[in-house]
Amino acid sequence: MTKKLRTCLLQIASAKLGLAAAFVLAGCLELQAQANLYTFSQSTGTYTPLTSPTVLGTGTATADDNTYQVALPFNFTFNNVTYNSGTNISVNSNGFVAFGTTAPLGATYTPLSGTTAYAGAAAAFGADISGSSVAANTGELGYETIGTAPNRILVIQYKNFVRYANFAYVTADLLQFQIHLKETSNVIEFVYGNSTVATSASTTAQVGLRGATNAVFANRTTTTNWSASTAGVTNAATMAATNTVKPSNGLTFTYTPPVPCTSPPAAGTTAATVTAGCTTIASTILSLNDSQTGTGVTYQWQQSSSIDGSYSNVSGTGTNATYTVTNLNTTTYYRAAVTCSGSTVYSTPVAVNVYPATPDYASLPYTQGFESWVSRCGNTEVPGLNWKATPLTGNNSWRRNDQGFITSGWSYPADEPAPYPVAASQGSYSARFHSYGTSNNTQGSLDLYVNLSAAGTKTLTFDYTNPTGNDKLDILLSNDGGTTWQPTPILTLTTNTGFGGQSVTFTATSATSVIRFRATSDFGADDIGIDNIRLEVTPSCPGVAFQPTTAITSTSATVNFTGVASGTSYTVTYSPGGTPQNLNTVAPINLTDLSPYTVYTVTITTNCSGGETATATTTFRTAIGNDDCAGAVVLTPSPMSMPVTYTTTGATDSGVTSACTEAETGDVWFTFVATEATALITVLPTFDFDAVIELREGNCNGTALACRDDIDEGGGAGTETLNATGLTVGNTYYLRVYSALANPTSGNFDISIVGQAPAGTADITKETFKYYPNPVVNELTIKASSAIKQVTVYNLLGQKVLDKKGSQTEELINVSSLTAGTYMVSVQSELGVKQFKIVKN
């Protein structure tokens, strides 16, 4: 108990009854534990279902939008109010409990931000949820008191609950969680069990505490991981609830009432929700990390124009641990004076930067590796303060290659890294334009503001990638700070597999020049990237300028370049492999004996007089080796599924007439010698690649035996399985694989041949077979329309790592013991066999 609190209690004891005592009491209560001062912690424990709960409601009949009154079995203090044993609390079927005589409405889905005047609330999963009405997993809302005095726990349990989304109950859900109210300590816990969250819906839930009004709260928020949530800054903050973002089994959130503050207090570090902006920052919320909370602690916010300058009190901020700044138009530093029992300490300041609309102009020479991005007008939207981004956010905004899905809301994060297979040409990161998620002909720009007043021609070099498609990158020049632009780009780039070196020289002498990197999207298969920028006055010994690499085959390519006047000779190297070549004149470089479908990096060193040198690099990928039947890849049947990865990217149409669906794009070829009379051939494609399998006997134009194109017309990565029968042991067979889509997003796929297909193998289509989640952490759910007999998991070396016999149409496979990585799963049901790939996190 603090000195102030003791003094208050003595004043109350000695005061006469009446108005004076009331004022003393009100002042004392201000020192007590409000809900927003509770301390949050999390742990991983064990979820223990109740053995004999008192049932309040079941299914959607009585456990949907209902509030029940439950008598407390012991005294319990919450939000500065003690509720005696026998006092009712409100248990709501939408994942929360409320205190006080005012009960929440049954259909309350936002218990923390709602305005109903109950005296307080604790929400473990505050959302529109209901007990499941599925007979096999009926939902149940109940409670039970466990333990012995003075350490009893009132447990409110939500068993087999489901979310309501898209105007329907998500019947595939099975949510399990409990709210614990602990005797004596007055601690509140939210304990989560092993929950199934269906892929068919994405919702949110409010999690945390609320006081007598929604202005007093302590809640959590996340969009990616319940085990890495952060404190909410508004009472409407939520936790995402999807099949991949959900509480793990045993996750426990603990809210502990604050204790009286100690002197000297801990000040902590100041944080701001918005730390940078242009011209004016409309609003930013200041808060404290690692600061002391508790009864008796007060806060006074202060500001300064410099980090180590004189700080003055901000009037009208009260004594709260948060403060909202509005309409800020100059860079300001903020800190909080934290006081307890007359002792004051100051939090580490935070800078809230307000930048002018026009960036600073960089000087030459200028380099940029795109490793660290900053917030200037948006959220980490530029690689430095000499840059400006348009737009600030969205799929067509530029970002560091790994940040767009987080800070700019880019689409299709689950398809990573296919649209951007190489992260950088040097260092770890690059600048990336998300053409894969941006509608056709939509543009996004990165503008570099630079002083080009130095005499001499200027040279811009950088690395560039854009593997496929019609998207492009234009480099534009302005000499008046971006007001007007030269009508013709100084450089236009289209496709370039891998990061290839680019170079352009131009004349400019303005101190207010802007170089614009403007990308135009085709909404195609991959993204545009730039890296390793250098802008300088043209050196006396510059690097060569590469031209597009031509005559690319699976084993050869011709690298073209333009030499420089000061170059006396050139040294050429390439990797992987390769012997250095010395050239005395500019000539195309003919590379041979290369490996199919491999990225090669070619480096040319320019040798100038006086011993000066300069290097430039370019990259290209060789063509696939099995584009034609003559280069068919040999596959060896195996008793178990042994998938290997190939691609149709870059393939051409062989023109073979077939009774199957005609090839809309290029095809690739495989061959195998039958070892059994049957063979199970499986092709698992990546996103948006509608695979077709064609089987021929003898040679490429031999007898067409069978074809397979039944799954996922229109794409969606559906597995195609061809059960070949009547094969002749020792005979040679050919497989032709292609996409039925005219413009598949990706041509990558896994192919395997099981030498002897299990008896009774038949079609298992997408409509009769499901598995989720993928990626998986602990449990994989597999569903079929008939009983599942066997589930076997193999690693990529073909070794069996898990085996389970089954008898139901739905089986849960515990994969928690497996190490992180990729695995193949083989499932045999009464209808046949299915193989698919999973990723274990």
Image (cartoon, helix red, strand yellow):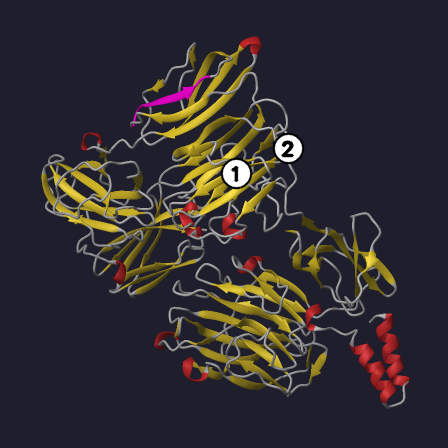
Q: Is residue 229 left or right of residue 3?
A: left
Q: Quadrant of residue 770?
A: bottom left
Residue 567 screen position, x and y as percent: 49, 13
Q: Name the one closer to the observer, 750 or 520.
A: 520
- Residue at 11% across / 44% down in the picture? 705
Q: Secondary structure at mark 1?
A: loop
Rendered image: mark on residue 485: 1
Answer few, some or many: residues within 10 Å of disc 2's Cα (few below 14, many 20 plus, some between 14 and 19): some
Name above or below for residue 463 compared with residue 781. above
Answer few, some or many: residues within 10 Å of disc 1's Cα (few below 14, many 20 plus, some between 14 and 19): some
Name above or below for residue 804 compared with residue 753. below
Q: Quadrant of residue 291?
A: bottom right
Name above or below for residue 163 compared with residue 840. below
- Residue at 64% across / 37% down in the picture? 361
Residue range (magenta): 554-563
Q: CA distance from mark 1 to mark 2?
A: 15 Å
Is residue 558 a member of the stretch shown in magenta? yes
Q: Amino acid at mark 1?
A: Trp
Q: How many marks?
A: 2
In which quadrant will I find the N terminus? bottom right
* The residue positioned farthest toward the bottom in the image shown: 17
Name above or below for residue 586 compared with residue 793. above
Q: Name the one closer to the observer, 439 or 336.
A: 439
Q: Amino acid at mark 2?
A: Ala
Which of the marked residues, 1 or 2, is nearer the chain's N terminus?
A: 1
Rendered image: mark on residue 511: 2
Q: Secondary structure at mark 2?
A: loop
- Residue at 68% across / 85% down in the picture? 84
